[in-house]
Image (tube, rainbow, N blue to C red):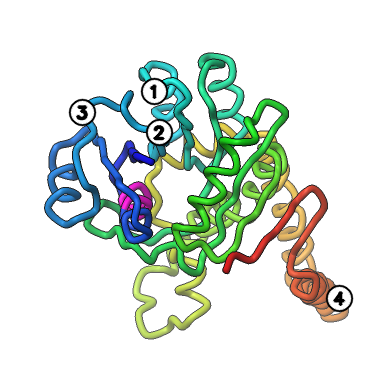
């Protein structure tokens, strides 16, 4: 099986390295020569992919719009499996099936990353403790799905999460996109100036993901606006409840609000945060 990774950034480069670690032949393609030459010289890929049409599996590791445009215009090998790694799935799935009904498409979303980007920060073990979301719909080819499922296991992922594109986007709006927005808003407080020495783990946790690529994340937010806007509205309402209790010195009310949050969090932990329409498998 010959595999090609298109887009040799942090995630694409790590996919290539993880697959090579597992013994697969991996080619790479990238718009800039610098990342491609780095991948070649540092053993992230076996060769440059000059003709993507000669590979059996193609992972497209590009932002949402670029992913759609690439898949829509590229000439793939007949029977090739094409998989994206985008943080939204309904948009990609809808556009791919609409514009390229001839290809075998499977959507994935690796739940791993770093605060830094670029092929130079890619590593073969990035996914070893991570989850991979694999989406499946009515038009998903079963054989192609199983091939990607096996590659996910071989890449070293700890957990496989299977669901529809719709369920993925609802969950990711809350678990990822909303968290990034909260962090971005949190650092806009002028108190951030001169706070060195006053910070601990909670500050680091709250600010770690504030410095996002605004162009890429705007694409992700806009592609999932319906789910994300609802989560933002709910968060605002919960913050307003806390604000009212604090402003009114309502000790009893504040304790109740904090207790409700703690109990809901503990309840979620106890059932491993699992929900309906989601299948979770621990990979050996």
Magenta span has 120?
no
Q: Residues within 10 Å of mark 1 (few under 14, many from 20)?
A: some
Q: Is residue 216 above or below residue 210?
A: above
Tell me whether the residue at label 1 lies in contact with that at label 2, contact meaning CB atoms closer than 8 angstroms: yes
The image quadrant of residue 22 is: bottom left
The alpha-carbon separation of the residues under discs 4 and 1 comes to 60 Å
Q: Residue at x 46, y 25 (%)?
A: 68
Is 227 or 72 nearer to us in this picture?
Answer: 72
Q: CA distance from mark 1 to mark 2?
A: 7 Å
Residue at image mark 1: 77
Residue 103 in view in this figure: yes
Quadrant of image for the N terminus: top left
Rendered location of residue 149, percent (x, y): 57, 48
Q: Quick one: label 2 or label 4, which is nearer the N terminus?
A: 2
> Residue beneath label 2, please?
56
Q: Which residues are magenta?
A: 10-16
Specify the quadrant of the image occupied by residue 260. bottom right
- Find disc 4 in the rendering and name its residue: 256
Q: Quadrant of the C terminus?
A: bottom right
Horizontal relation, residue 197 to residue 97: left or right: left
**Labels 3 and 4: the sequence-earlier one:** 3
Q: Secondary structure at mark 1?
A: loop
Q: Which residue is mark 3?
A: 50
Residue at 47% over, 37% down: 84
Label whose residue precedes the other's in the sequence (4 or 1):
1
Q: Quadrant of residue 5?
A: top left
Q: Is residue 248 above or below residue 169?
A: below
């Amino acid at each position: 099986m010959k595999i090609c990774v298109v887009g040799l950034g942090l995630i694409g480069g790590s996919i290539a390295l993880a697959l090579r670690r597992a013994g697969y032949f991996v080619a790479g393609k990238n718009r800039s020569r610098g990342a491609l030459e780095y991948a070649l010289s540092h053993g992230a890929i076996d060769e440059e992919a000059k003709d993507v049409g000669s590979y059996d599996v193609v992972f497209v590791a590009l932002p949402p719009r670029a992913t759609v445009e690439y898949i829509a215009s590229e000439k793939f090998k007949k029977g090739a499996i094409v998989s994206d790694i985008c943080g939204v799935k309904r948009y990609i799935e809808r556009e791919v099936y609409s514009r390229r009904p001839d290809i075998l498409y499977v959507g994935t979303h690796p739940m791993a990353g770093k605060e830094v980007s670029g092929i130079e920060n890619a590593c073969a073990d990035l996914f070893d403790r991570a989850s991979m979301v694999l989406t499946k719909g009515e038009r998903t080819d079963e054989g192609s799905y199983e091939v990607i499922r096996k590659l996910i296991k071989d890449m070293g992922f700890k957990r496989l999460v299977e669901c529809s594109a719709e369920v993925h986007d609802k969950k990711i709006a809350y678990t990822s996109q909303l968290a990034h927005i909260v962090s971005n808003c949190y650092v806009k407080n002028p108190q951030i100036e001169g706070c060195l020495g006053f910070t601990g783990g909670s500050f680091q946790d709250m600010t770690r993901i504030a410095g996002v690529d605004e162009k890429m994340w705007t694409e992700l937010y806009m592609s999932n606006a319906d789910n994300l806007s609802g989560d933002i509205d709910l968060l605002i309402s919960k913050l307003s409840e806390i604000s009212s209790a604090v402003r009114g010195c309502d000790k009893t009310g504040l304790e109740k609000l904090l207790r409700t949050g703690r109990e809901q969090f503990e309840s979620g932990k106890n059932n491993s945060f699992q929900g309906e329409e989601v299948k979770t498998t621990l990979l050996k």
